[in-house]
Amino acid sequence: MKSIGIKLTSIMLGIILVGIIITVGVAAIISRNVIMTESLAKVRQNTKLEEIKLDNWLMDQLSGMNALNAILSSDDELAEILLADQTGATANLEDQVTDLLKPTLKAVLDDNSEQFEVYMGFLDGSALTGSGYRFNYATWTSYERGWYKTALTDTTHSHITLPYVDAQTGLLCITAAHAVTYNGRLMGVIGADIYITQLQDITLNATLDSKGYAMLVSEAGDILIHPDSDYAPDEECNFKNLGTIMNGAYADLWKDVTAGDGTYEYKDATGTNKYYNAAVLPSTDWHMITVLPVKAVTQPITNLIWTVIPISVGILIIAAVMIFINVRNIITKPVSALSAFMKKAGSTGNLEFSPEEAEIIGKFSKIEDEVGQAINGSALFITHVTNTARSLEAVADGDLTTEIEVLSEYDTLGKSLKKMEDSLNEMFDEIQTSSSQVSHGSKQVADGAQALAQGATQQAASIEELSSSISEIAERTKTNTATAEKTSKLSEAIIESAEKGSRQMDEMITAVSEINEASKGISKIIKTIDDIAFQTNILALNAAVEAARAGQHGKGFAVVAEEVRNLASKSAEAAKDTGGMIQNSMDKAELGSRIAGETAASLNEIVNGINESSLLVTEIAKSSGEQTLAISQVNVGIDQVAQVVQQNSATAEQSAAASEQMSGQSDMLQQLIAQFKLKNSDAAGYRGLGAGSGGAAGSRAQKRLPASERRGFQAQDNGGDFGKY
């Protein structure tokens, strides 16, 4: 895993590197433009200077001819000879003017070391040289020479010829020529021959760089001087033309050169980009062209870049070290300390600050920047979470009186915990109240059921005394006995349902409702017993009447009828008393049902069981009715009374047992609730209830969170509010 310091350093170095690249790139572009502009300007300037130097040299040669022309054109004696009619002359003009002209030509030749010959061609085809050289006129005629013809194109100024092969030396040379006139009449043409090496020296020395060169091109495009021998004229002095050589490879360049002076970039024959700087010589309209490779101009830029790159790399390295050190001190160390603690907290769940962690985090929290604020805020949050965890631990131990501190309206965790504690307090308070009421009501129901069971037992004992004499009645009651057994089994199922409901708080409330329903069924049974007693009493009266009619034979039966009537009366009184107690139980159960109205639906199972029991009891009543209709004897009524009494006794005992069990479950529920210490309640009363359930529950209910454990994180000597709430 990469450190945040390395990441930030990499990002910042990347930004610096991009900045350096952009800066170097922009600087290189600007430098290139500046250097290129200055270099090309310097090239143009130097080319112009070399062109001026060459042109001045040519102008010097032309000036010499102009001076010589001025001397000769004003020589009357020379004009007289040269303009005289030569018809019948015995000598050519060379011989006629030798003594007069030769000293002048020789003096000019001696004064100009660059000229290897000075001469004057005459109208007759002869010529006089300053060196004394004589031409072979059989093959040579002055007015047929190129220099002679060139001078005649404009007699007002001097001319420079293109290079040609000198007849005297056989070498390439140029001639500065001027037509000599006297009063508008041509006397001849003077000329000075100059080896082309003079032009070559000036031209080839005009290069601006060892990789460049210069060439001289005529106004027609003929390459007069070039350092490459491939571009030299042939033996017949035929020149290579810049516009046509190499199949017109330089044709576009030549067009630009003829268009005007300037710098032009073209590829040469090898494909190398070069700058061609052209400048025209005013004296001859020739073009001096200096050629320089583009690389020679851009080399300073390359050198500059290669100088800047190491410097930039050095700056980048220094910046990397400085950035890494600063990022490590300002960000990495503080964040690493917090990250180490958060990693420990995430892997172990331990949110407690050790003294070393408190000192380190407290130190970095004093940094007055975003990192320090982040560390301080994180420590505050951790402290808040720690305090919240302690409050939750107290709630888990049963202390619902713990005060949950909410930092602000946006403290979601604190608000949720406080809401949970308040809800638990309300819920357990309501459960305790309801369980107390249910316990009280169940005890009353148990007492009434016990009294009813005792009365029924007494009735059963009285009827047992009659069992020997009413065997036929016992036979008829088998059906009712079987039905009663079914009712007993169903009651046991109801008890199991009640036990199941007692294990659940909501099913307990259902049991209360079922007791209410059972009480209503018992009331019906009591009413039925009362009706049976009434009918039995009537039957006893009828039996007494019949016994009286029988006279002496009916005395024994009259005694039995009297006893049956007494038992019926006692059963009616017992049923009345039991009905009152059951009514009282129904009222109490109704009170419990109203309190537990919200949970009444969960008692359906017990209610259904009691309903089935009522159906069986109804079946017993129906069977008893059938017996009443089937027999008109007292034995039938006594049998019915016996069956009802037995059923009443069993039901009363079962009701008493169920009430006792429900009362025990209610006490257990109160003991469980007593384990929790609630707000706005009598702590002593709850502890008393809890103590009855055992020492462990009591100790849990009485456990408190020490005040020292509820303090927040305190940074050591931080001089501020770090870690406080």
Image (spheres, rainbow, N blue to C red):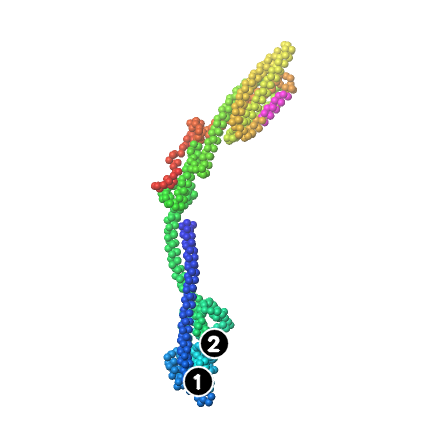
Residue 351 colored in magenta in the image? no
Q: Residues within 10 Å of mark 1 (few under 14, many from 20)?
A: many
* Residue neighbourhood size for the residue with mark 2, other residues' Cα within 10 Å, grouped as few (<14), some (14–19), many (≥20): many
Work out whether residue 159 or residue 321 is closer to the camera in this orientation and state it.
159
Q: Nearer the viewer, residue 632 or 498?
A: 498
- Residue plotted at (43% across, 83% down): 79
- Determine contact: label 1, label 2, CB under 8 Å: no
Image-quadrant location for residue 493: top right
For residue 82, which numbered disc appears in the image? 1
Badge 1 amino acid: Leu
Mark 1 or mark 2: name the one nearer the start of the chain.
1
Which residue is found at the position 43% from the left and 55% from the top? 18
Residue 482 visible to the viewer: no
Q: Residue at x 45, y 81 (%)?
A: 185
Q: Nearer the viewer, residue 206 or 540?
A: 206
Numbered label tally: 2
> Magenta residues?
612-626
Q: Residue furthest front?
A: 183
Q: Which mark is residue 609?
A: none
**Which mark, residue 239?**
2
Q: Secondary structure at mark 1?
A: helix
Where residue 621 appears, as percent x and y from the top left, is 61, 22
Q: Nearer the viewer, residue 651 or 382?
A: 382
